[in-house]
Structures are given as structure tokens and as C-alpha cells.
Image (cartoon, rainbow, N blue to C red):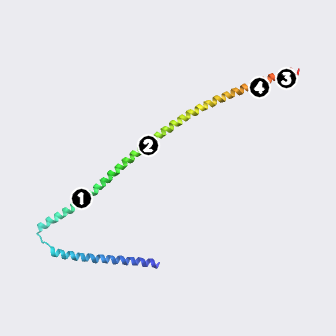
Amino acid sequence: MLGGEMMGENEKGERWSGAMTNLTEMASNLESLQKLLLTKAVFVDDDTFSKASLAADQARSIKLLQQRVETLEREVDAAITAAARARSEKRQAEAAQKAAESRAHQLTAELENTTKVFKLHMEELRAKQEEIEKRDEDIKLLEAIIRTLGGKESLSTSQ
């Protein structure tokens, strides 16, 4: 636990030291700037100063407006790109939907054809079943006739 606290205090010390170094450098830079201004200073009348101040303010305003225009242009470009991407995705979705609908129609047609074939097979099976039942009835009738005839023969042979 002490190691973590020591590490935190050490980092704070480094930050403080870095901040102090930055402040010292800033003070040195300000001194240099002040000396430069004193040696190179030009004194002008109030009218010229106000015109220069106005020009400087206008230049700052123009720069800010130019930056705003550039930002808006980037936003418009991004919006145009997003709209193009959305249109492309919409076209892809529509194509996928058409393909799915086409596949659904194909499957429906296949299912209808399969149903028709199944119905035909069922009709054939019913016809065969009826034929088998008819033959079964014929066989039973023939068996009855044979039994009847066989019974008469056995009666006539035994007499």
C-alpha cells in the first residue's frame, strides 16, 4: 500500500515540477516579448490605432468565419457521402428484396407443381386400390363359386 501512495506522491511531484518549469518558460517568453515591444514599438495617433484595431478585429472575424465555412463544407461533404451510402444501401436492399420475392415465387410454383403431382399419384393410388378391391371381390366370388362347385362335385362323387 505504501508503494502505491509513494508512486502517487512521486507523480504529483513530477507534475508540479513540470508545471513550474512551464511557468518559468512562460515568464521568460513574456520578458522577451516585452523587450521586443519596447525596442520596436511604434506610436500612432488614436485614429490610426482605432482603424488598425478595427482591421485586426475584422481580420479575426474573417478568419473565424472562414473556419466556420470550412467546417460547414466538411459537414456538407459528410452528409452528401452519407446520403450516397444510404441510397446505395437502399438499392442493395431493394435488389435483395426482389431476389427474395422471386425466390418465393419460384418456391411457390415448385410447391404447386409438387401438389399437382401428389394429387395425381393419390388418384392413381385410389384407382389401384379400387382395382385391387374389385379383384379381391372377384376372387372371393370365384372362391365361393369354386366352393359351391367343389361341394357339388364332392357330393356327386361321394354318391
Q: Position of residue 1 (x, y in %)?
A: 47, 78
Tag of residue 143: 4
Q: Residue at x 48, y 40 (%)?
A: 103
Q: Which residue is mark 3?
A: 154
Which residue in the structure is indicated by mark 1?
66
Question: Pointer 1 and pointer 4: residues touching (CB < 8 Å)?
Answer: no
Q: For marks 3 and 1, give the CA distance.
A: 128 Å
The quarter holding residue 147 reads top right
Q: As drawn, is 131 to the left or to the right of 36?
A: right
Image location of residue 81, percent across then percent down: 33, 51
Q: Earlier in the sequence, mark 2 or mark 3?
A: 2
Circle number at residue 97: 2
Callouts 3 and 1 close, C-beta under 8 Å: no
Nearer-N-terminus badge (2/4): 2
> Crowding near pointer 1: few (<14 within 10 Å), some, many (20+)?
few
First along the sequence among labels 2 and 1: 1
Q: Amino acid at mark 4?
A: Glu
| Cα distance between the residues tagged 1 and 4 | 112 Å
